[in-house]
Amino acid sequence: MAEGFEEELDQLKTFLQAWVEGSNQEMKPLLAWQFLGRSKYFRPVTLFACHAAMSDAPSGPSPIRAAAAIEMVHNVSLIVDDILDRSRYRRGKLTLHCRFGMLPALMASGYVAADAYELVDKNAFAIRRVAELFRRLAAAEILQWRLRRHPLGIEDWRMIAGEDTGSMFEACACLGTGDETLRRFGHLLGMLYHGCDDVGDVRGTLALGGGGEEDLRDGILTLPAAITIRDPEMALHFREPTPAGLEQLLAGMQASLPAAEGYLDTIAAEAEAEASRAARSPDVLIDLVRNTRKLSV
Amino acid sequence: MAETEETEQSREEALRRLLADAVEVQLAALKAGISFWTEWIEQTSVFVQSATKSLSTFNAEDQETKDVLLELVDAGRASIRAMTEIPRNTATRFIEELDRIEEQKAEAAKKAAKKRPRKKSAKKAASAKRKAKKRGTAKRPRRATRVKD
């Protein structure tokens, strides 16, 4: 995934290490636990790739700071999500609230959010993008929860995925280029990532995290679910889940995987076309799309 | 004299540039307008084709009407998205629509509840809930991981 950006990622890791070291004494162990472990760094890689696609200049301090800010926003969303899910493990180790307690974890998320803004305080455009991202993530979570068990369609999934993961990757694209040129590309890439994760869950791809069965029990509209519930009988099981109905739904979702993969191919093609249209050097973005697409297959 | 001529020439040059700029802007606006309407016509045509195809299967016995309707709804939304490219506006309208449906459902549930004999008074139910909470047996809603990592 991170091919070609090892140097930038090393700089980012050093930056985050220094940030943790310089943080408040009370916060230091929590931040080290959350930030200095395993991470896929997919969002920072997206930011660096967008920067490289529009500029020949190497990623200086500004893209590194912006990448750190994005990683922080992402971690705030993970901490809050783990608390709400009562998840015990994340990335192979105890979640922050399980290791340190609920109150410290919640306070750490606030601390990280504040520092994310401070990292980009010299750049009004970046501040606005971070603020936009927090707003959209919050609203998307409420929307997704409120729409659970509604027998909706693929277009609705597209809207949810676009606001949830899509907004995060839009921010990466905008912060990487310093303008709006690759916003739509970021949106499509985020949606692709969201869909690949949905399909990967059904395939039991543990590497991507999450859980297809849990989503199904909660009536969350994933891409395979949106395709499966086109069948009215399946839509009824989705709306009023029973153990037998859930089994049928799971079987239906497995059967829907070729259609879901086909739809993901369409999004990948849209993203590649957008990269070719908008970027000065689209190859790096096209590689990113192709690597993302591999996540579900 | 020479100076006046020079001033006039530079004024003419400035005017020429201004006019050229204006024409360029007008052309760009025209191009954008044409491109918008072309896309609009294309998208409308795609949707109409899809709708016609779906509607024509209503009479076929091998496909459920509801299934066709779902496809049609999806095609409609795809058309709106492609035409406007402003998904947030579409989302707002869509959410408003859902709100309206939810309100209607809540109203209907309220009416149905009024007709049903009550099993337990609200006071008793609240007290049972408090007791269960004290014992630590109150049901807490679970939630699956939503944020993609």
Image: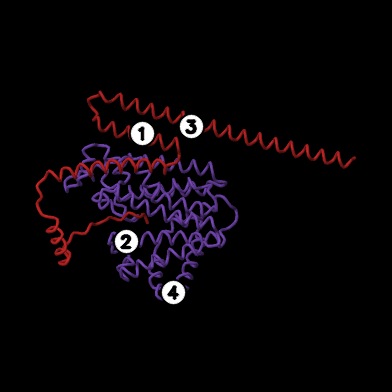
- Judge by depth and name the residue closer to the eye, A16 or B25: B25
Say whether mark 3 and mark 1 are on the same chain.
yes
Say whether mark 4 and mark 3 are on the same chain.
no
Q: Chain of mark 4?
A: A
Neighbour class for label 4 at 10 Å: few (<14), some, many (≥20)?
Answer: few
- Judge by depth and name the residue closer to the eye, A12 or A161: A161
How far separated are the C-alphas under marks 4 and 2? 23 Å
Q: Amino acid at mark 1?
A: Ala
How far separated are the C-alphas under marks 2 and 1? 36 Å
Check disc 3 and report the residue beneath it. Answer: B39
Left or right: A98 in relation to A4: left
Neighbour class for label 1 at 10 Å: few (<14), some, many (≥20)?
Answer: many
Q: Which color is chain B depicted in?
A: red
Q: Amino acid at mark 3?
A: Glu
Residue A118 visible in image: yes
Q: Amino acid at mark 4?
A: Asn
- Judge by depth and name the residue closer to the eye, A221 or A210: A221
Q: For numbered disc 4, what is the local secondary structure?
A: loop
Q: For numbered disc 1, what is the local secondary structure?
A: helix
Check disc 4 and report the residue beneath it. Answer: A24
User: Of the numbered discs in the image, which one, if any, rests on residue A82?
Assistant: 2
Question: Tag count in the figure?
Answer: 4
Q: Can you tell which quarter of the image residue A1 is in?
A: bottom left
How far separated are the C-alphas under marks 4 and 1? 53 Å
Q: Residue at x 43, y 36 (%)?
A: B82
Quadrant the C terminus of chain B occupies: bottom left
